[in-house]
Image (tube, helix red, strand yellow):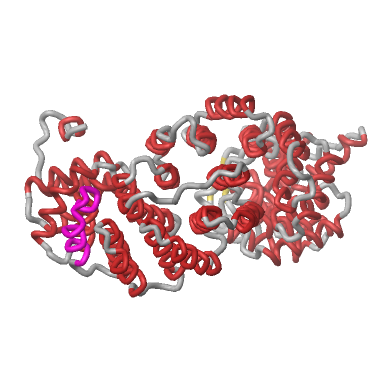
Amino acid sequence: MTIADLLPDDVETTLSGSYLAAMSAAQARDLDAATIFFEEALSLDPKNPFLLDRTFTLLLANGKVEQAFPIAERLVATSDISRMGQIALGIRALKNKNYRDSAERLNKGDRGELANLTASLLAAWAAAGGGETDAALKIVETTQGPPWFETFKLFNMALIADLAGRQADAVAYIEKSYKSDPSAMRVVETYARLLARAGRVTEAKVALDQFAKTGAALPVIQELSAEIAAGKKPAPLVASATEGAAEILYGLGAALSTQKGGDDVGTVYLRLSLYLNPKSELATMALAEVLRSSEDFARSSKIYDKIPKASPLRRTADMQIAFNADAEGKRADAIKDLKKLAVSDPKDPEVLTSLGTLYRNDKRYAEAADYYSKALAVITPDDPRNWLLYYFRGIAYERLNEWPKAEADFRKSIQLSPNRPDVLNYLGYSLVDKGMNVDEGTALIKKAVNLKPDDGYIVDSLGWAYYRLGHYDEAVAQLERAISLRPDDAAINDHLGDAYWKAGRKLEATFQWMHARDLNPEPADKPRILAKLAKGLDRVDEERVASATGNTVTDATTAAAAAPMPTTLTIKAGDSLWKIAEKLYGNGELYIRLIDLNRGKLRNPNRIEPGLVIEVPAPDSAK
């Protein structure tokens, strides 16, 4: 793609235009266009430090690392304190095994804690590449950083010592790192590799098994466990200084990309890691995930597809490609891809669960329940981690009106993990709404609210529970709070309307129902909302009961409907909308039709001024 592909033929490029287009494209996360426009702006103002820095950064983020180096040279020439420019050039020198030049580059400039940490660790690997192991270890040891850095520092010292053949030192360093944080995957992996090679196979197996119990039994760890169990001696984690430096950039990049606002820097670090070690599958996966989290799904899938077919990570990559397809609105393709994975391994609970969730999101609840059942059939049923599966299947059963099955799954989910507010709320609300066990349902919802007090849906459930108990003032208080948390939810507005009506605040009820009507409610809910607007809640409830019992309800508006109806009416002293509706239609509750037709005129329906002319709907439209 070039500038010509982005602009019409008759448009002349200018510095300000290119800059503004670049900023707009960057804000829209269009890396290709942003890079091209910044390059164009830079060509028009080649010594501008800001343009040099942004162009350099975007070229890196876009994977055009080789193209970024000439910009980095210009950047450091313009501003010798450009830390990232020097780091990039130092990385290039390290890859080319120019270790002395690399160290000199990495020791220049000062651009903040992160860049300084990065540069120091990379300088250590440059020293290690030049055979200066003691100097490399000293650099790492004397580098200061935040509390989390201690684990990372010891981890790198272990890798440097291992690369130099100092096995005893490597084991000592990694033992300290592992003790500091036994949940860090690369630390656990290195710990197991070093111990297994030192003959301490049992300890290596225990570490891997304990890590797997945390729920993070990643394919990489599973493969290493199988390798050690087969009596093989695992290879070192890194086999060169270049790979060690790439590991630094991968570790920092992956961590940064999970932090708010850190995805741009994380992307740059991961791109540089892959420049040093293009075969790093973990860095590839991390980069694809960053792009996915940025909603760049097409680019993310292309990165995932670079994972080799024989890799233990390939199955995970294929799953993520399917999720990207679903995020792009291609749910049929996503389901098709996941079904292929299910055929290749019918006992993969993650794939089966994902299929269930896609079907549930598509409101195909029978298929969803079927796949959730298949997933539950291949796992340990009483594992606390499986609470979510029972919850999801319970939702599917509830939507299928198979309440006994749904209730059993919700209760099983709560048994496995008692403090999940969403599950407590779903079961509690269902019990309340069905009128089966309102007291228990209310208690469950109260617990959910205590666990998650700012969730509008859960607060709405508590309000609805009070409504079903007949505590209308308490219902109003909770539902008003729910509206403050979720103002644009149709169901909550509808609930508040009902509570207002029962509390005697009928005008306010009407406005809430109108709002609910305009917020695209569920198809099953809309007819009842419209009926309440036309007739009022009491009338609708009477008709519902009558329908259930086979009785009929007398229509009080029948006689009034035959009378002539004016199209406009002038308000007189003492008038109210209720009185007007009662006079015209024989039913005061139909005042809401007057409100609906005269929204622009009735700023406050409780106060209508004499002399105001309002429009009056015909009797057939007022039913």
Main SS type for the magenta part? helix
Name the spot of residue 466 as percent of width and height, x first: 79, 60
Name the spot of residue 92 as percent of width and height, x first: 21, 50
Of residues 613 and 212, which is closer to you in this image?
A: 212
Name the spot of residue 434 as percent of width and height, x first: 83, 46
Q: How many numbered circles are shown?
A: 0
Q: On screen, 338 above or below 131?
A: above
Which image quarter holds the C terminus? top right
**Residue 600 seen:** yes
**Magenta segment:** 93-107
Magenta stretch holds residue 78: no
Instruction: Give residue 305's quadrant in the image.
Output: top left
Name the spot of residue 461 as percent of width and height, x first: 72, 56
- Relative placement, left or right, of 518 versus 100 is right
Q: On screen, 476 above or below 373?
A: below
Of residues 139 and 509, which is closer to you in this image?
A: 139
Which image quarter holds the N terminus? top left
- Relative placement, left or right, of 139 versus 387 is left
The structure residue drawn at horizontal position 9% and vertical position 37%, both measured from the top left corner, is 12
Magenta stretch holds residue 100: yes
The structure residue drawn at horizontal position 92% and vertical position 36%, both measured from the top left corner, is 549
- Relative placement, left or right, of 176 versus 140 is right
**Residue 583 seen:** no
- Relative placement, left or right, of 68 versus 465 is left
Of residues 134 and 91, which is closer to you in this image?
A: 134
Instruction: Give residue 102's quadrant in the image.
Output: bottom left
Of residues 174 and 508, which is closer to you in this image?
A: 174
The structure residue drawn at horizontal position 81% and vertical position 40%, both measured from the top left corner, is 556
